[in-house]
């Protein structure tokens, strides 16, 4: 599913126009992005948690020339950790 399809489903489920749903989805994405940029976590109980993680610098291998080593710099990356309710929904099981 791409963003357009997602917005369409949100509009249908939220009983709103496509334009309203598009603005709402974009606002949610912007807030999550801004929070992650400032180092904050964003957690939705049961659904999951968006956070940032630090990746250490490491030595890699050039796939076109495996004899050459390449230094990969340290960086900050976004992460998503799914919550229990989401995991159960995807697995098709549900606790009572």
Image (tube, rainbow, N blue to C red):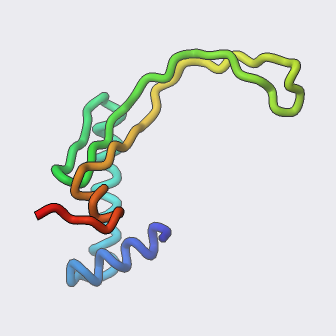
Work out whether residue 48 or residue 96 is closer to the camera in this orientation and state it. 96
Work out whether residue 26 or residue 89 is closer to the camera in this orientation and state it. 89
Percent position of residue 44, x then y: 20, 50
Q: Quadrant of residue 16?
A: bottom left
Percent position of residue 3, x then y: 45, 67
Percent position of residue 46, x then y: 19, 53
Q: Is residue 26 above or below residue 45?
A: below
- Image quarter where the C terminus lies is bottom left
Residue at image location 44% in from the left, 76% down from the top: 5
Percent position of residue 71, x then y: 70, 16
Residue 24 can be seen, yes or no: no
Residue at image location 28% in from the left, 83% down from the top: 12
Residue at image location 28% in from the left, 38% down from the top: 35
Count of numbered badges drawn on the protein: 0
Residue at image location 24% in from the left, 42% down from the top: 42
Residue 5 can be seen, yes or no: yes
């Amino acid at each position: 599913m791409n963003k357009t399809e997602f917005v369409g489903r949100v509009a249908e489920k939220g009983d709103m126009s496509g334009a309203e749903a598009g603005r709402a989805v974009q606002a949610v994405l912007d807030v999550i992005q801004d929070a992650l940029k400032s180092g904050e976590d964003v957690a939705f109980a049961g659904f999951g948690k968006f956070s940032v993680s630090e990746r250490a610098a490491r030595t890699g291998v050039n796939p076109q020339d495996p004899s050459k080593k390449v230094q990969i710099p340290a960086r900050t990356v976004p992460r998503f950790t799914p919550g229990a309710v989401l995991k159960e929904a995807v697995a098709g099981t549900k606790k009572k």
